[in-house]
Amino acid sequence: MMTGDVRRVLVLGGTGWLGREVTRAAVESGAEVVCLARGESGAVADGAELERADRVQPGAYDAVTGDWDEVVELAHAPDLVGPALAALADRAAHWTLVSTVSVYADDAEPDADESAALVESDDLSEYGAAKVAAERASRARLGDRLAIVRPGLIVGPGDPSDRFGYWPARLSRPGPVLVPVLAERSVQVVDVTDLAAWIVHAGTTGFVGTVNAVGAPQPLGDVLRQVAALAGYTGGFVEADDDALLDRDVQYWAGPRSLPLWLPTSAAGFARRSGAAFRAAGGRTRPLQETLRRVLEDERARGVERPRRSGLSPADERAVLVALGATGA
């Protein structure tokens, strides 16, 4: 099913962070791009058309008529994924579902690939379980027209989660920096622009299958030292072990009062997934140094002192350092 000389691409979403990057990449590829969204997350990329609709309402898909060379689904909620498949699957030559490495049941094993066991849960309010359900529903409906991409930590300018950007922002400010014990901890990211480029590539080439969209694992300490060098930070790191941080109400990974990217050692495999299938399918990841520069510039433009969705506020970090007896805090 091809629609003509100009490829027609439908992005279900397209006004959020990743969706806008996918839309921009699709427009740059020469496709005619339509985004179906409420439009509350922002504007679509230049050159794309926005069809405003609330996807949980009846008739949400009425405006996106005709056949599509590619549909990109970013959602995970069953009340969005199921109706989209019912309305559009018969009119799509190819479909790409953006899933997540959070679908895996075991985060302990390093270098696990796409064959690893998935989360089994009936609680579809859990993100990983909902994405597993979305994968299964999509596979059942689309068969050999489906690409499933499971990104790891998506990073880059404009990241609304404030996770990765916490460190370039923090290392742009003076004073001792609180970090977890760095030994045997890794970071594994994919730049949002590289991920969007592969999603468009998958649709253009008709790729079918499942890939973990992840870059090479990097030691957390090495990454923080690279950030410090780029930011011109000359202070020191104060390492604290997990128990000391948890006892002072510092949280893992993300969200308020967290140390972003910090994971329990029992979850070391989360940041060390195999990306071999992604690379074999044409996935390309830019050097981490380039992504770090992009994020640092973005954080400084947005304001390194701004309130954040993830990380420790300056006051909270100082209080924890004082409680740990760190000098100079």
Image (tube, helix red, strand yellow):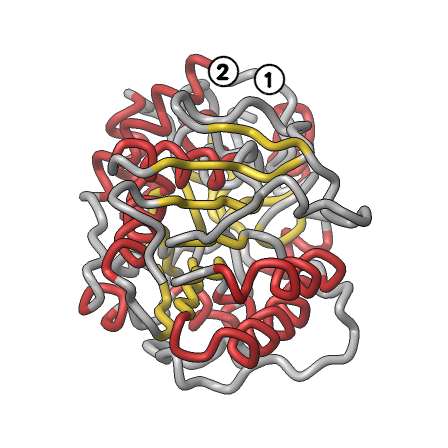
Q: Are marks 2 and 1 in contact (CB under 8 Å)?
A: yes
Please name the residue shown 18% across and 43% down the image. 287
Other-residue count near label 2 (Cα within 10 Å), few / some / many at <14 / 14–19 / ≥20: few
Q: Circle 1 sits in a helix, a strand or a loop, which is it?
A: loop
Residue 187 place in picture, x, y as percent: 37, 55
Circle 2 SS class:
helix
**Mark 2 against mark 1, which lies toward the viewer?**
2
Q: Is residue 11 left or right of residue 212?
A: right
Percent x, y for residue 106? 53, 80
Residue 302 is tagged as: 2
Give the position of the C terminus as an image quadrant: top right
Q: Which residue is mark 1?
A: 306
Pick whichever, 192 or 185, lies toward us: 192
- 285 in relation to 295, above or below: below
Residue 18, relative to residue 66: is it above or below? above
Q: Residues within 10 Å of mark 1 (few under 14, many from 20)?
A: few
